[in-house]
Amino acid sequence: MVEVSVVPKSGRFGIEKKEGRIKVYLKSPPENNRANLELIKEFEKLFGKPVMIISGAKSKKKKMEIPIEEKEWKNFLLTL
């Protein structure tokens, strides 16, 4: 399980590690679930695996399930 904070309607897509947390900037607004759909789509592109939002669908703080090994996640974090 991965915890992220999102910034919808930021005008760009980007991911950064800030103070030990993952912050995801999304182009889409939160209306009509568009920001969540963008979040899922972009993480699926990054990892090539299906992604699900487990909690926080209507919140800026979300928990997502990404079926990857911990080592793969840690390697990804090193790129941020």
Image (tube, grey):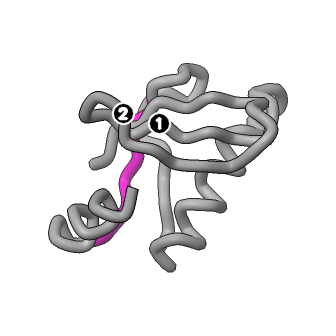
- x and y percentages locating residue 47 in the rendered image: 46, 73
Mark 2 vs mark 1: give the one in front: 2
Above or below, 9 relative to 13 = above
Residue lying furthest bottom: 48
Q: Which residue carries the number 1 mark?
A: 23
Q: Residue sitting at 27 percent across and 64 percent down?
A: 73
Above or below, 77 relative to 8 = below
Q: Which residue carries the number 2 mark?
A: 18
Q: Which span is picked out in magenta?
A: 62-68
The one nearer the camera, 65 or 43, is: 43
Type of the residue with mark 1: Lys
Q: Residue sitting at 52 percent across and 71 percent down?
A: 46
Magenta-colored stretch includes residue 46: no
Q: Mark 2 falls on what kind of element?
A: strand
- x and y percentages locating residue 79 in the rendered image: 36, 64
Q: Mark 1 falls on what kind of element?
A: strand
